[in-house]
Amino acid sequence: MKYINEFRDGKLARAIGEAIRREVDPARQYNLMEFCGGHTHAIARYGLPDLLPRNVRMIHGPGCPVCVLPIGRIDNAIAIASLPNVILCSFGDTMRVPASGQSSLQRAKARGADIRMVYSSLDAVSIAQQHPDREVVFFAIGFETTTPTTAVAVKQAEALGLRNFSVFCNHVLTPAALDAILSADQDNAPQVHGVVGPAHVSTVIGSQPYEAFTARYNKPLVIAGFEPLDVLQSVRMLVRQLNEGRAEVENEYTRTVTSAGNRRAQALVADMFELRPSFEWRGLGEVPWSALQFRPRYRGFDAEARFAVEKHAVADAKACECGTILRGLKEPKDCKIFGTVCTPENPVGACMVSSEGACAAYYTYGRFTIPIEQAPS
Amino acid sequence: MCLAIPVKVVELRPGEMALVDVGGVRKEISLALVENIEVGDYVVLHVGCALQRLDPQEAEETLRIMAEALLWQEGDA
């Protein structure tokens, strides 16, 4: 497909890898955190670590909305779906995330709850139109990329006068998560020298919001697309910045990201949503001002108000390392249950569910690779 | 989850909708988040909505910058 295939060219990928090799300072370590699950997936799928010199290490960040959704919120969604007369619409990614008591949306569906997988929030609006006698709830998750699409659906439902449509809002914010990771105390913060910044989140919010971040932490950030060449090129740009002692926001993904971002989408979101004082993230715990909720004018569409959803905190499975993996402190192979008890078919933690989760990406593409230092020469 | 793919607009439809070509498959999407889209434009599609118009000149420019790595390699050989 146009604008995809060109950015997956193997010959060019090896050339960029070679260029990075020449440019790195052998005496120095480059730990780069890729924020997004989309980057993590590309890195694992295309074997990018094999193209990078040994002193460039990719650390996986928390940018996977399915992975950071805490168990309590999944339990809430199952509780709503189990009410009589409710149809819960969910993205496919969320269906298999483990909830309390060995449950999940998929298992609740098997038990009889009317849970439907949708591709778009707009599909949920169509279902509400088709079933005026049922309560249709859209289980909204995602970062700044997805929030505007939820807002479009609510606007559409409002225009159609649908009173049976509501949204269980779990939209979260990228800058708050970046901040939570990098401001953690030394024992809980990974050694990160630079950040591969979000792709489509930045398409919406622009590159400008990261300026405060590079200034505060004195670390470079390069916004990168999700194709393998985009990731490699952004690594090259980060290496250059670090070599030159710069800590700036740079944009590799200029074909869709501008400095100001998508103002129309931003205005729509700002009109409908306000900051939540606090929201629980898997791995990061309660993070202040890190998520969105409906403004009072749109409360009629808020499933939390309509179904009196109560805050419900549940601890993660003890053996599961999702939390430390999401903070960039551990890698999937450091988890005792990785690939044995916890597999994509039978996930214990959310990082094994989403294809963008670090564990699922490792399991699918990297489980049999031999670390370079152990490989026969 | 934040995955979005470039698709080509083949027809503009009422209600800020458009028909797009996704690698040979036709699909109706919403243009409610973007402005001034024309037939033939590429937009970045995420869960049923166009998020932004893809800038073809910037795409070319990015590929040109990436290809510098190739020239350097060949020049050295």
Image (cartoon, coloured by chain):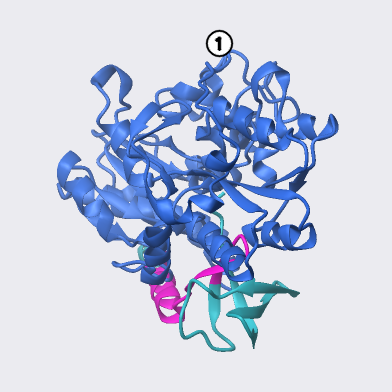
Q: Quadrant of residue B31?
A: bottom right
Rendered view: A345 above or below A86: above
Q: Position of residue A70 (x, y in %)?
A: 53, 28
Q: Helix or strand or loop: what does disc 1 sit on?
A: loop
Residue A266 visible in the current orientation: yes
Residue A17 picture location, percent across and down: 43, 51
Residue position for label 1: A318
Residue located at (58% from left, 62% from top):
A153
Q: Nearer the viewer, residue A6 or A313?
A: A313
In the figure, the shade used to draw chain B is cyan
Disc 1 residue crowd, few under 14, some 14–19, many 20+, Cα 10 Å: few
Magenta stretch contains residue A374: no
Q: Amino acid at mark 1?
A: Lys
Residue drawn at (58%, 13%) of the image: A336
Q: Which residue is drawn at the image coordinates 39% and 45% (left, top)?
A: A173
The colour chain A appears in is: blue
Determine whether, in the image, residue A301 is placed left or right of residue A113: left
Q: Is residue A199 visible?
A: no
Quadrant in the rendering for residue A366: top right
Q: Nearer the viewer, residue A352 or A131?
A: A131
* Residue numbers of the magenta segment: B44-71
